[in-house]
Amino acid sequence: MTFSGLLLTLNSDDQLAEAALAELARHPAVTLGPRRERWQAVALEVADGADSRAAHDWLLALPGVDYVDVVSVHFEPEPLAAPLAPAHAA
Amino acid sequence: MNLDRRDFLRLSALAAATAMVDRRAEAAPTSPAPAAGIRWQKAPCRFCGTGCHVQVGVQNEKVVAIQGDPEAEVNKGLLCVKGYHVGLALYGQDRLTQPQLRKNGKLTPISWEEAIDVAARRILAAPDKFAIYSSGQSTIPEGYAISKFLRGGLGSNQTEPNARLCMASAVTGFLSTYGVDEPAGCYDDLDHCDVLVLWGNNMAEMHPVLFSRFIDRRSRGEKPLLIELATRRTRTTPFADHFLLFKPQSDLAILNGVAHLLLAWGKHDAAFVEKYCSFRRDTEKPSLAGQPMSFDDYKKALAEYTPARVSELSGVPAEQIELLARLFARRDLRITSTWCMGFNQHTRGTNVNRLCHGLHLLSGHFGRPGDAPTSLTGQPSACGTAREVGTLCHTLPGGRLVENAEHRAETEQIWNVPAGRIAPKPGYHTALMWEKFCTPTDKGGDLRTMFVQATNPGQSLPNLHKLFRAKKGLEDKFLIVSEVYPSATTELADLVLPAALWVEKNGMFGNSERRTQQWFRMVPPPGQARDDAWMILALAHRLLELGHPGMKDRDGRFLFAQKNEAGAEVPVWDWPHYYDLNVDRALFEEYRRFSAYKHKNLAPYDEYVKTRGLRWPVVQQPDGSWRETKFRFAEGDDPFVKKGAGVQFYHSTTKNDRAQIWFAPYEKATEEPDQEFPFWLCTGRVLEHWHTGTMTRRIAPLQGAMPSAYVEMHRDDAAERGLRNGDLVALRTRRGEVRLPLWIDGRGQPPRGSLFVPFFDERLLINELTLGDIDPISKEPDYKKCAATVARVAPNPQP
Ligand code: SF4
């Protein structure tokens, strides 16, 4: 599992921002924290890095979200999906 | 994972995000959350040239947590996704932990004693055929040790940093415009500008924290304008107010077109130009100095760059060129330009840098906070180490030049080595250095032993077959590589030396905005891995033992002799004693003596210990404190500008305090698409990986997010060829072929007729295909454009 703390910058249009927050509240991977002015704290829990990227893209695509900053990432070495091997390895 | 732990991790993530929400809303600054047993210390991030500071949490001699450093001015507590994972770069499972020598074709573990002896004897056998290839990731003391060892010890200038591949054109642009390297402005410009122009600079992915710093102004009700010029859409594009999509190489024409309009409209800043600028163009053979030209000749030379002609060359609609010119014509606006590899990795890289500076000077957008042309760097110490210390083949510490007899004499004086020790002839630039190493000795390949530190040329050099892979089978060539992980470079190495990484050693970096940063060793390196600077000192001492005369100074002392506070000699070349004193501090204090010549004054080491970095020139105040400089050449902030001067270019190449506005023509790229190779191929980075991926590919969340390289293609080009997403395609240029998956439209969207491939993936070496043609002045290769073709090899296995 990957746990990230995110700082969302919400759109200045409050209706859009509220709609985005409602959508976020429905998402099982998202835990909403406090909002101050246009900044919203979010914790995101996803299965792996690929899901994390998809979730990040989804957040950015919400009309009520202007920007997503990653604030913290939980630190737990995960095994790599595939071993690394250089192009010319014998 | 049990529920409690999961809740704990989720709540920790939320707490960190909440702290940042408070901070953004300008509540009290947040410090790293206290946690039992974790010791927090500051360090700059190991990855890019932005130079964010992190707080590193250490427990039981292991890095266990990372947070953005709220006290750091650069990043104000934020980091990008790479920065948050930087601690994991230390803990890949295949860390190199023991020296290895190739015996009968196989790398075999040996002792450090043998490794240093083998390397020293190779050097001793032919010192003039030995070269060091280091890095913009080498720390400042490491770079300084290399320079002193080679130039002051071996009397050789065969040293190059990999920064030749990324920053050399920025250097020549600054030098030929202002007479001194590095930006006048700093990141504060991003907070003050009304308009930010990104010249081929995908800031959202490459310098994400800087981008966030700028974009955040919008959420505070400010309306700074973002103009992006690029050859493909990127993650930056959705944030741009105006996106100018241009054909590769035509940035030269666009810059000339804007300058032409300013003059045609009479909207250039005549008073600024009259007072502070001269005009210049190249001689027939391009050079750093060029030749003077008159304002009238400059105007005439620009006359052909009408909006219609520029539009034809660049594909940018004339109205967009006019829009850009109208912005530069307004003195009430403050305009910051940034660029990075798009300008620099260019066969006319010096010229395109010059033109951008020229546009700012011509329009008077210079010298006020928010009004500055600023290059950004890719590596954490390309500025601090490669450019300031001077590990390029033609430079001496502190901006001095190898070819200048006075500079050599000053350097010899500080190093206390005999007069004449430093050779007057520059060494080979990077491309030539590797060509000489990879060419058989009897065919003119006169470099026999190379020592690579902190970089991965086996993946990052262009035209790899010629400049790296050709080493294979050349029996008398010997490649020494100091590395942290197996790489495309160690694969051909004859001797591999395991290196300490980042907070496993003391270090200092210099970031893109002239900020010198310091950190202390926090955890031990794994196994027998050791510091790069120690390797240089140990080699020098072994050479001394073997009788090399250059390893002694004029008084017969070892070149790197160090005494402790009690005045006793400390054998720092002997690893158990290396940390008996702070070698970084000693080397930096010596290097600092070089820094005033180009007004890049540095503070004492201990000042950097106290701060999150200081931007040079750093000058001592009457009260004993040390003051940094945000805006160079501007009266009021730069301590070296004369009172009443307003702006003063005190290192002017024409010795009259004037900067040079260059004219340079649009010229075609050296290789352009044709019938056989109908696509432009551009290469670069992605957000998740840093450079050749040696570190980030070992970090599971980053590797999982971006597991392999791909080729981006426009959907219509794919449809025309019957290609589908995920198909395995053969990408071919005149230099080779690489097979990789197709990503239709990719992250942004390349325009029709163009392809993009990231270079982080060592299994898919895209640099086997890149061009290797270089800028004639900076000698930096072009990685951004060559001609390519694509054909399907196999359909997507999971359609
Ligand atoms: S922007 Fe660069 S320096 Fe900052 S955290 Fe990301 S990789 Fe590190």
Image (cartoon, rainbow, N blue to C red):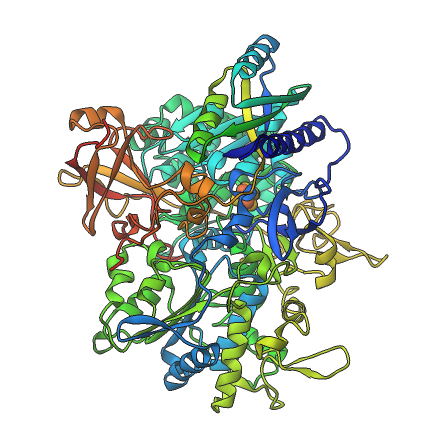
Q: Which residue is situated farthest in the front direction here?
A: B2
Image quadrant where residue B794 sits: top left
Q: Is residue B374 visible?
A: no
Q: Quadrant of ligand 1?
A: top right
- The number of numbered discs placed on residues in the rendered structure image is 0
* Residue drawn at 54 percent across, 27 percent down: A44
- Say left or right for B255 vs B76: left
Q: Nearer the viewer, residue B314 or B271?
A: B314
Q: Position of residue B226 (x, y in %)?
A: 52, 27
- Say left or right for B224 vs B350: right
Q: Position of residue B532 (x, y in %)?
A: 52, 68
* Residue drawn at 35 percent across, 56 percent down: B776
Q: Nearer the viewer, residue B257 or B112?
A: B112
Rendered view: B648 above or below B102:
above
Image quadrant where residue B228 sits: top left
Q: Nearer the viewer, residue B495 or A12?
A: B495
Rendered view: B105 above or below B62:
below
Rendered view: B721 above or below B711:
above
Q: Nearer the viewer, residue B170 or B382?
A: B382
- Say left or right for B746 vs A76: left
Image quadrant where residue B20 sits: top right
